[in-house]
Image: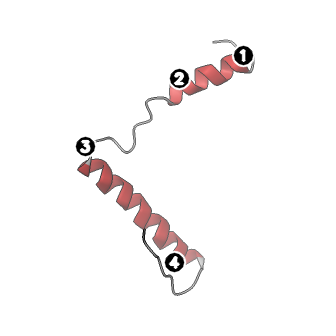
Amino acid sequence: HATISMPTLDAYHLGQLFEFFLIEVVLLGKLYRIDPYGQPAVEVGKKITKKLLGGEE
């Protein structure tokens, strides 16, 4: 559990917080030897959704 303090809640500091989390995800991906950018189930999910909505496959 972590507490994050920000001097002010404005676009600049919120952007810094988002960047921190983006970098954290990349570093954790390297640490756990996984691809943090990979989305292996996205295409399968699209096909299932399209089928459920009555679209062609």
Identify residue for label 4.
13
- The crowding category of the residue bearing disc 4, from other C-alpha atoms within 10 Å (few below 14, some 14 to 19, many at least 20), is few
Identify residue for label 3.
33
Separation of disc 2 and disc 4 at Cα? 37 Å
> Which residue is located at x 59 percent, y 80 percent?
9
Which mark identifies residue 55? Answer: 1
Whether residues under marks 1 and 2 lie with C-beta atoms below 8 angstroms apart, the answer is: no
Quick check: 31 left or right of 26? Answer: left
> Which residue is located at x 42 percent, y 59 percent?
22
Identify residue for label 2.
44
Q: Closer to the N terminus: mark 2 or mark 4?
A: 4
Q: Closer to the N terminus: mark 4 or mark 1?
A: 4
Q: Helix, strand, or loop for circle 1?
A: loop
Q: Mark 1 or mark 3: which is in front?
A: 3
Separation of disc 1 and disc 2 at Cα? 14 Å
Q: Closer to the N terminus: mark 4 or mark 3?
A: 4
Q: Closer to the N terminus: mark 1 or mark 3?
A: 3
Q: Position of residue 29 (x, y in %)?
A: 31, 48
Separation of disc 4 and disc 1 at Cα? 43 Å
